[in-house]
Image (tube, helix red, strand yellow):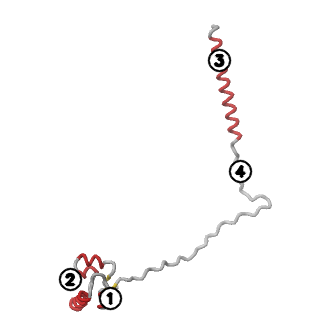
Amino acid sequence: MNRMKPSLIVVLSALALIGLALIYYLRRRSDKVTPVITVTQPLPNEQPVPEPIAVKTPIEPTPTKPDTRIDINAATLDELDALPGIGPVLAQTIVEYRAKHGPFETPDDITRVKGIGLALAARLKDKIRAGS
C-alpha cells in the first residue's frame, strides 16, 4: 500500500493542475467575448439615418453599328468590284445574273453566279447581304 500512495499523489496532483489550467483557460476566454448591443431607437442628440432612396436613371440605348455590308441586289458595278475576289468581269456577271433571274434571296445565293464558288462565297459572307 505504501507504494501506491506516491503514485496516487502524483495522479491527483496532475488532475488538480489540469483542472486549474482548464478553469484559467475558460475564464480568460470569457473575458475576450464582447457583448453585442443592438440599438433600436436613436440615442439622444442623434439624427436618425434616412432610408436610402432608389434613383432610376434612364437607360440609353447602345448605339448600333451601321451595317456596312453591301446589298448584292442593289449594288453597282463599282461597289461589287470593290469586294475581295470580285473583279470588273465578275461584277458584270453578277449584275447580268440579277437582271435575268431576279434578286438574290440570301447571300449564299451568290454561288449560283458562274465563277463564284463556295470558297469565294465564304470570303464574301461577312461583306454582303441580300436585301435590307
Q: CA distance from mark 3 to mark 4?
A: 47 Å
Q: CA distance from mark 2 to mark 4?
A: 85 Å
Look at 79% across and 59% down and name the residue there. Answer: 44
- Check disc 1 and give the amino acid type: Glu
Q: Where is mark 4, residue-wise? A: 37
Look at 64% across and 8% down and name the residue there. Answer: 2
Q: CA distance from mark 3 to mark 2?
A: 107 Å
- Check disc 4 and give the amino acid type: Ile
Q: Nearer the viewer, residue 73 or 1?
A: 73
Q: Please say if 103 is above or below 27.
A: below
- Check disc 3 and give the amino acid type: Val
The quadrant the N terminus occupies is top right
Q: Which mark is residue 79?
A: 1
- Sequence-first tag of 1 and 2: 1
In terms of secondary structure, where does tag 1 sit? helix
User: Is label 3 in contact with label 2 (beta carbons under 8 Å)?
Assistant: no
Q: Where is mark 3, residue-wise? A: 10
Q: Please say if 77 is above or below 18.
A: below
Q: Nearer the viewer, mark 3 or mark 2?
A: 2
Q: CA distance from mark 4 to mark 1?
A: 77 Å
Classify residue 49 by image quadrant: bottom right
Q: Where is mark 2, residue-wise? A: 115
Q: Nearer the viewer, residue 6 or 34?
A: 6
Look at 24% across and 90% down and name the residue there. Answer: 92
- Sequence-first tag of 2 and 4: 4
- Sequence-first tag of 1 and 3: 3
